[in-house]
Image (tube, rainbow, N blue to C red):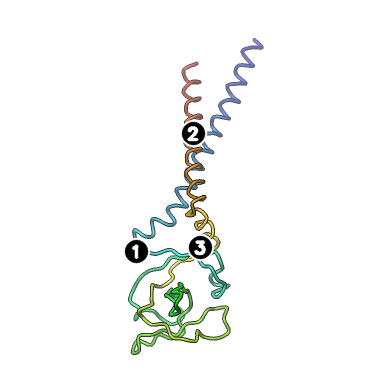
């Protein structure tokens, strides 16, 4: 009688450990898939993703935010829209600032960073226009920057592999306990 109770207790404990393995493994896989989809899925619908690296647009766009850019005609950009464009300087960096004025006749924008005291010194040519910011997710840019680095990719693969292993362990144990009944 005592051995039967002990056996049932081990089955219950083993069952909960197995369930934790399956749930943890599934969560690990889902997290990696969701993070990767934040970069891949928007591209399917014509959006580009960038992460904010300077504080010129704070507090609207904080450093490390992930931003989604929709391409379009520069003539359609309105005052107060946040746009992304290539710098006219030699470094060719990418800048995200707010439109102060869209001069369709000259094909240029006047822009300003929300945190800056004055407008940008040079107008932005329509040729440098990338698109308009449609969505921003705070802090997610930093996370995805890490995920897309070499070490991040290795970690992502390891997390998925561990998730699969935990799912297999949990499923296998469940099958074995089903055979014992």
Disc 1 marks which residue? 46
Label 3 with label 1: CB-CB less than 8 Å: no
Q: Residues within 10 Å of mark 3 (few under 14, many from 20)?
A: some
Which of the two residues, 113 or 21, is positioned nearer the viewer here? Answer: 113
- Where residue 165 is drawn, which disc sits there? 2
> For the view shown, which residue lies furthest in the top direction?
1
User: What secondary structure is marked by label 2?
Assistant: helix
Label 1 with label 2: CB-CB less than 8 Å: no
Figure check: 165 above or below 110:
above
C-alpha distance separating marks 3 and 1: 18 Å
Disc 3 marks which residue? 137
What residue is rendered at 34% in x and 73% in y? 72
114 on left or right of 36: right
- Where residue 12 is drawn, which disc sits there? none
Figure check: 20 above or below 95:
above
User: What secondary structure is marked by label 1?
Assistant: loop
Which of the two residues, 78 or 106, is positioned nearer the viewer here? Answer: 106
Figure check: 25 above or below 155:
above
85 on left or right of 114: left
Q: Quadrant of the N terminus?
A: top right
Which of the two residues, 103 or 19, is positioned nearer the viewer here? Answer: 103
What residue is rendered at 50% in x and 29% in y? 169
């Amino acid at each position: 009688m005592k051995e039967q109770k002990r056996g049932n207790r081990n089955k219950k404990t083993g069952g909960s450990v197995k369930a934790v393995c399956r749930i943890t493994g599934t969560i690990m896989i889902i997290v990696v898939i969701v993070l990767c989809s934040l970069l891949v899925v928007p591209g399917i619908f014509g959006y580009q993703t960038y992460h904010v690296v300077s504080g010129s647009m704070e507090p609207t766009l904080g450093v490390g935010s992930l931003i989604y850019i929709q391409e379009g005609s520069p003539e359609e950009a309105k005052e107060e829209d946040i746009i992304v464009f290539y710098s006219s300087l030699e470094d060719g960096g990418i800048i995200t600032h707010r439109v102060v004025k869209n001069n369709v006749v000259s094909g240029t924008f006047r822009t300003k960073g929300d945190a800056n005291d004055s407008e940008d010194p040079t107008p932005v040519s329509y040729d440098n226009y990338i698109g308009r910011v449609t969505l921003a997710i705070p802090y997610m840019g930093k996370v995805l920057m890490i995920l897309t680095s070499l070490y991040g990719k290795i970690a992502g693969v390891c997390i998925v592999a561990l998730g699969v292993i935990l799912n297999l362990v949990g499923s296998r144990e469940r099958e074995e306990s089903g055979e014992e009944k």
